[in-house]
Image (cartoon, coloured by chain):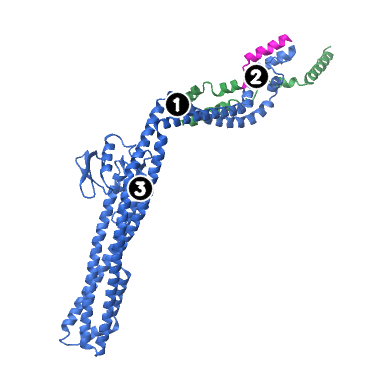
Chain colours: A blue, B green
Amino acid sequence: MISGRVALGGLSVEFGNARRRFEERAEEVRRIADEHAGLLQEEREILQSLAELYLPELSPSAVGAGLAEMEDELRAALRSQEVHRKALFADLAVAEREVAEQQARAEALEPGEAAAADRVRRCREAAEEKLSADDEYQGWVADHEAAMERQEVLRKRRSRLASASSFERRRYDACLPYTRLRDRRWGTPDYRGRLIARVFDRWLARRIDYEELARRDVILTEGPRLTHAEVQEVRRRAAELERLTDEREAAVLAEVGLGNALPSWEEAKRGLEVERERLDRLRLRRDGLVGELQRVEAKQGQPWQEAIRRHRDFLQGETISGLARRAEQTPDPRDDDLVRRLGAVRDRIETSAEALEAAREELERLAGRTGFFADLKREATRRFVQRPARFSEEFRLEEALGANRDGAPRSDAVLGRLEEASVSDLHGPFAHVAGGLAEWVAAIESSLDHDLRIVEEVVDETFTDVLVFDAEGRVVSRRVTRRRAEP
Amino acid sequence: MTEAVTRRVLHALTDRTDARTLVHEHFDRNRSAVVEAVRDTLLATRQDPDPVELQELVDQGLIDDLRLPDRLPAAWAVRLLRPGVLPAIAVASAVVLGALALLVF
């Protein structure tokens, strides 16, 4: 078995990859948006030149004023985004510092909790060893088990016997040959019969096998009551055995020191959980700030988009459209260059707008994917790393993530698959890890942070080489393992 | 009187109809051997019974074994011993024999 930290180390890599792709795409969106704004400005300047050529004296200034207002709006939007971005940067720096401090606090508690858990595990092992060597205790345990089985058998028997008794006893009472002998107390010193009656009764008892019928009648009559009494007796005996075993266990646990180790472990675990919950909350806040900052840096903010939309509406308005048409239709050598440049810049604006739209859609998809991995990593850390869990050595994170790895798979489905693959470890961090593997896992866990990456390289048909890298790409562990059979 | 008391004491000491003993002997004596025999027989007939189910089958069989047989012999003889039946038969026989004697002689 391998620990949840090692098994899920790949999640950090997936999260890092998704975040890197998001940042690359955000950079591209920023570049296209800047280019787009530049093209709009160029279009505006060309149109202003055309307006000065063709429109009456007041109109160029009116157009110019409108264009200047658009430019002011764009600049204001950019300024407000910049202010917002700076504020976010400041908040993010504070949040990062708080996360780091909180992480350090949580990590400082981990060795204490691990040591306390180890102490409890050692105490339990010592207690189990002592109890398994205690013949008297083992005898009680075996007797208790036998008593419980016996009790179950007796309870069912009592129920069946009571049911059969209520029906069969009426038949016995209605059977004349049997009741004659029974009522005359045949076979007992109380029997009184004269010579002929005695001869007849002897003959009758032989014919109907009276002794056997009397035996059955007694069992049917007394059986339910006696069985019930035996159930009570067995129950009392089982309770007594439970008391004895509990007392012996308590004495042995106290002797090995579990009474002191257990409360200190509980306290250490509780303290660590509180710190980790606080860390989760701080990370959630930091991730929110990072997401908002990324959106602002990608110029996806509402003020910027509104300013761009108004700018384009103004440039496609009737006055500007009329001006462009007039310039195209008028054979004037002064505007040839302007008209050609206007056509070219509008083509480029069209292309740029399409590219911007596509890049933004991609950015949104990547934002969803990054968020998915952030959520998954946080939840998986909480469920499978902070609480000790084990995974089979055959476990592969890629299979748990499913086939749709480019999109954002459903996190609950992935977590469900991880739950199925994991084995809870309630007895301490290394209880189910055996032999050399325990040392291997312990060496990794003691020396690494959470950002592990596991790479599997095929050595030959039989073996594969499993390499574990840390966040900086250093090889921290290497292990040759047998390959899984091909399905 | 002394003889009656002695007889009762001896009977109590040798009594084989003590209810507790009877119940124990019927259900629990040789039970494991019975269960094992039933299991072996079922296995021989290519049936693999569940151990719990097997225990319950044996218990049910032992309870069924306590039922009264449907047709007991000698019930007619008991009816003859009811009050008045034997005198009536004797009178009827005497009448028949008397009638036969008159016819013969």
How many residues crowd mark 2 within 10 Å: few (<14), some (14–19), many (20+)?
A: many
The one nearer the camera, A466 or A303, is: A303
Res. B47 in view = no
Query: Which mark is first along the chain, 3 or 1?
Result: 1
Q: Secondary structure at mark 2?
A: helix
Given the current orientation, which residue lies at the most extreme bottom position? A56
Q: Which tag is nearer the camera, tag 1 or tag 3?
A: 1
Q: Which mark is residue A210?
A: 2
Quarter of the image for the C terminus of chain B: give it: top right
B54 to A355, vertically: above or below: above
Q: Which tag is nearer the camera, tag 3 or tag 2?
A: 3
- The image quadrant that residue A363 belongs to is bottom left
Q: Secondary structure at mark 1?
A: helix
The one nearer the camera, B80 or A314, is: A314
Magenta extent: B1-19
How many residues crowd mark 1 within 10 Å: few (<14), some (14–19), many (20+)?
A: some
How many residues crowd mark 3 within 10 Å: few (<14), some (14–19), many (20+)?
A: some
Task: Report whether A142 appears left or right of B102.
Answer: left
Q: What amino acid type should be assigned to the residue bearing mark 2?
A: Tyr
Q: Secondary structure at mark 3?
A: helix
Task: Report whether A361 appears left or right of A253.
Answer: left
The residue labelled by disc 1 is A137
The one nearer the camera, A84 or A404, is: A84
Q: What amino acid type should be assigned to the residue bearing mark 3?
A: Arg
Residue ID at (18%, 82%) = A338
